[in-house]
Structure formats: C-alpha cells, structure tokens
Image (tube, rainbow, N blue to C red):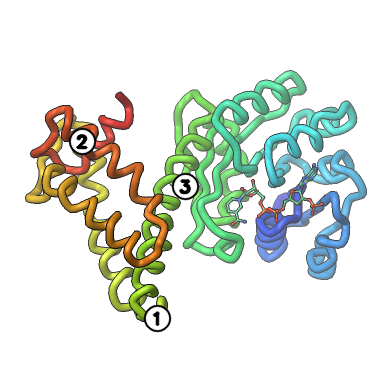
Amino acid sequence: MAASTVSVLGLGEMGAALASAFVSNSHPTTVWNRTVSKATDLVQRGAILASSPAECIRASSELVVVCLVNHDAVKETLLSEATLAALEGKTLVNLTNGTPAQAREMASLVAAHRVEYIHGGIMAVPSMIGTPAAFILYSSSSSTFESVESTLGVLGRVNFVSGEDVGRASLLDMALLSGMYGMFSGAVHAIALAKSSGMPGSEFARDLLVPWLSAMAQSVGRLGQEADEGRYPSGGSGLGMQVAAMPNLVAASREAGVWEGMLLPIMGLMERRVAAGGVHEGLGALVEEMCR
Ligand code: NDP
C-alpha cells in the first residue's frame, strides 16, 4: 500500500525534522514555511513546496501537521477563510508548544469547519525525531487518533493520552518540561560550583554529576507513588535534616561567587512544610505542599 500523503506547515528546527522523517519514510510530503529558503534541503530530497498554507493543506488526503513557534503564529497561519476551507474534512495535528487552554481553543475554533483535531507535545529535540528515543504525547478522540496513528509513528514513539480533554497532552508536556528544567537548573548550578574549585566541567559532569543524578532519578517513581497515597515516609532523609543542610548550599554558593537563586524556591518550600509539621516527612510531601 502506498504511504499516505502528508502536509507539514512550519520548517523551523523542529518542523523541518518532522517533515524530514515523513520524507525518509516515503510519505509524499508537501511543505510550507513563511521563510521559503528553509524548504530547500527538503525539496532536494523530494518534498513539494507549497506557496501558501491553503495550498499545502490541499495536497494532503488526510493528515496536516503544524509546528510553529507559538499559538499566535498558528492562529495567524490557519484561521483565514481559505485555509479553514482547505482544512475541512482533514485531521490537523498541532505539535506547537502551548498551554492546555490554547489546545482547547484551537480545537473549538476548527471544529466548526469539520476538522478533526489532535494536539501533541513533542518530547524530543530535533535530532531525535524519527528515532525510538523520541516520544510524542497526543490528545484527541480515540477514533480520530486511530486513523492517523501509524503515519504519526514515523516521528517517534506514540503516546496517546486518553481522556476527554484535548488539553491533556499539553498539560503533561508542561509537566515533563518542568521536570527537565528542574534537572537543568540543578545541573548548571552544580557545574558552576565545581568549576569555581578549578575542576573542569566535563570531568565533574562525567565522573560525578551524571552518576549522582542517575542514582537520584531512581527515587522519582517513589515520589509519584507517595503523592497518590498521601503518605510521605522520610526514607532516612527527613525534611528536618534537609532544611538544616540547605543554608550550607546557599552559603557555599555565595563564598564561591556562584548565584544561589536556583536553590531558594525549593528551600522555601521545605521550610514551609517543616513549619507545618513535616519535619519527619520525605521530599514527596512537597508535592502536596505545592498545591496548598
Ligand atoms: P524555530 O524557532 O526553529 O522555528 C519557528 C517556526 O515558526 C518557523 O517555521 C517560523 O517561520 C515559524 N513562525 C514564527 N512566527 C510565525 C508567524 N507569525 N507566522 C508563521 N510562521 C511563523 O522553532 P522550532 O521549530 O524549534 O519549534 C517549533 C515548535 O516546536 C515550538 O512550539 C517548540 O516549542 C516546539 N518544540 C521544539 C523543540 C526543539 O528542541 N526545537 C523541542 C520540542 C518542542 P520562519 O522560518 O519564517 O521564521
């Protein structure tokens, strides 16, 4: 069976990687980008360049993927009369980063034009697209998703997050990015501290930081379970002990001339929990504390 036709709107770093994966998997791919020059490589590899979003959308029998910088750019690109008419009867997969409310807004704006809407959250950087290292969260009705699931599979592992809310993939995308930024906040602070002692960042990261963070990541599953159960055993590392140690991290940063600001929010949250009686609880109690 011939691979289905696909349209991709947006050829930034991520959009170009998505289009490239479709081309590599023999899907006849039509592309559009505001800055036309970004299509050159893809066209050399067999993609067809459309001169407008509507022309790009019309080239696909079913699947239209949009990946632009933000929600406003998507609305600007898709919400003209000609573009909405071209979208009628098609499945629109929006892989643009945005909030759950923006996903819901987009779904309702296109629903009036008989467009099946899927909102996605890409958990990958462009070089991972098309490999099993990438996964993408998707929200929509099950029937809409089933019709395009195998085509979307060429982009990376498919993670359909069921539920009525089309904003769910976006919410989980935000949650995962929050986890990632937490890790990177700690990592950049740790590397700055290590370098202040004269240790090369590469050596510190390879020999100490990566093994340490890998070991600590093992307890993240336990935090999730504790948050479900509402019980927060300390596991031998109670918040009272941690609150006593945190000022040392702050003081050591200041002594080393390294900005201590990354540490202050989590330290404040721990202090608040301890003040509320959580001295013998573990870090899982902070999940509950965040929602108070
Ligand atoms: P880029 O900055 O590389 O590209 C932005 C794209 O948006 C370009 O195609 C640009 O067109 C287009 N654009 C911007 N403004 C407008 C507008 N007003 N009208 C029409 N098109 C517009 O970003 P990425 O491709 O990296 O990211 C795209 C989406 O993917 C974002 O939502 C991002 O958060 C998400 N994402 C990116 C990841 C990454 O690592 N890069 C990882 C996971 C998600 P032009 O070329 O003409 O400027």
Between marks 1 and 3, how big is the CA–CA gap? 28 Å
Q: Residue 262, image x and y in percent? A: 39, 51
Disc 1 residue crowd, few under 14, some 14–19, many 20+, Cα 10 Å: few
Residue depth check, mark 3 versus mark 2: number of the one nearer the observer: 2
Front residue of 163/77: it is 77
Lower sequence index among marks 2 and 1: 1
66 lies left or right of 169: right
Alpha-carbon span between mark 3 and mark 2: 21 Å
Can see residue 246?
Answer: yes
| Camera-side mark, 2 or 1 | 1
Are the residues flagged by discs 1 and 3 in contact, CB closer than 8 Å?
Answer: no
Q: Residues within 10 Å of mark 3 (few under 14, many from 20)?
A: few
Q: Look at mark 3 in the image and give the residue it sits on.
A: 177
| Chain-order first, disc 3 or disc 2 | 3
The quadrant where residue 3 appears: bottom right
Task: Indicate the quadrant where residue 80 lies.
Answer: top right
Q: Position of residue 140 (x, y in %)?
A: 56, 31
Rendered-image quadrant of the C terminus: top left
Residue 249 appears left or right of 172: left
* Mark 2 closeness class: few <14, some 14–19, many ≥20 residues within 10 Å: many
Residue 71 percent across, percent down from the top left: 68, 36
Mark closer to the chain start, 1 or 3: 3
Residue at (39, 68) in percent of width and height = 191
Residue lying at 65% horizontally and 40% vertically, measured from the top left: 93
Q: Quadrant of the N terminus?
A: bottom right
Q: Amino acid at mark 2?
A: Ala
Question: Badge 2 is on which residue?
Answer: 285
Instruction: Measure how far apart labels 2 and 1 are at the Cα level.
Output: 36 Å
Per the rendering, the mark at residue 200 is: 1
Give the SS element for disc 1.
Answer: loop
Find numbered disc 2 in the image and state the secondary structure of the residue it sits on.
helix
